[in-house]
Amino acid sequence: MIKIAVIIGSTRPKRVGESVARWVYDIAVQRSDAEFELVDLKEFDLPLLDEPVPPSMGQYSQPHTKAWAAKVASFDAYVFVTPEYNHGTPGALKNALDFVYAEWNNKAAGFVSYGSAGGARAVEQLRLVASELQMAHVRNQVMFSFFTDFQNMSEFTPHERHQKSVDDMLDQLIAWGGVLKTLRENAKAK
């Protein structure tokens, strides 16, 4: 069985990302085809990238980098829950992605986004980053609008149709995550 992280991509005070991620997580854990864990970037308190050697070298020197690398490595796939800030991905999420490299390789990524345009532009940027990190990102994604899925743009009140979108995204993510896990295991066996 594969293990999937639902990553809260915002570290802002009073963020709504935590409620969005918990809602997705609550749907996910009802499934029996994968294990899920909620991962909060805020708990890792990563500074701006402070490693002296590029992450692709795998020579991590900072304790916070080693802890983050171990957490990322423990999963087969990821659901990135991201807001859209100024037509893009939040800096904290981009920074967390940039901290490590090999731990992301040959794994699957799915996206849940929110914002005035449903977070679509943040996900567009994340897809580019995921590709460079050698992650296979699934087509189906879940988008929430501040105008229809939040009261007063702050209280998360998703429309019930979104549950099917989450399940559709997870179906693809679990399929890709399983295939890529096999690929990684076969590569290790050689």
Image (cartoon, rainbow, N blue to C red):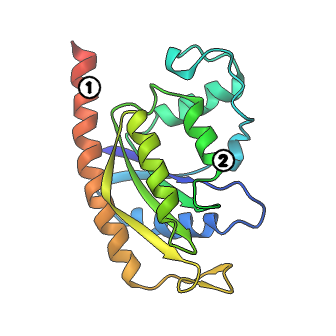
Q: Residue furthest right?
A: 13
Residue at the image point whose x is 66% and y is 46% from the top: 92
Tell me: 169 left or right of 70: left
Residues 120 and 38: in front is: 120
Residue 163: quarter of image: bottom left
Please say if 9 is above or below 136: below
As drawn, 39 above or below 53? below
Numbered badge on residue 90: none
In percent of width and height, residue 148 lies at 53, 86
At horizontal 23% and vertical 16% (from top left) the residue drawn is 189
Left or right: 2 in relation to 123: left
Q: CA distance from mark 1 to mark 2?
A: 33 Å
User: Along the horizontal axis of the image, is 32 left or right of 105?
Assistant: left
Residue at image location 76% in from the left, 67% down from the top: 14
Graded by Cα atoms within 10 Å as few (under 14), some (14 to 19) or many (20 or more), the crowding at tag 2 reads: some
Q: On the image, which quarter does residue 29 sit in?
A: bottom left
Task: Please identify the quadrant where the N terminus is shown.
Answer: top left
Q: Which residue is under mark 2? A: 91
- Residue 23 screen position, x and y as percent: 51, 70
Image position, residue 136 (x, y; %): 32, 42
Let me know if residue 78 appears in the view: no
Q: Residue at x 70, y 49 (%)?
A: 42
Q: Earlier in the sequence, mark 1 or mark 2?
A: 2
SS of the residue under disc 1: helix
Residue 128, picture quadrant: top left
Q: Amino acid at mark 2?
A: Gly
The answer to whether residue 189 is seen in the rendering is yes
Instruction: Tell me if mark 1 has few (under 14), some (14-19) or many (20+) residues whose alpha carbon lies within 10 angstroms of its own.
Output: few
Q: Which residue is mark 1?
A: 185
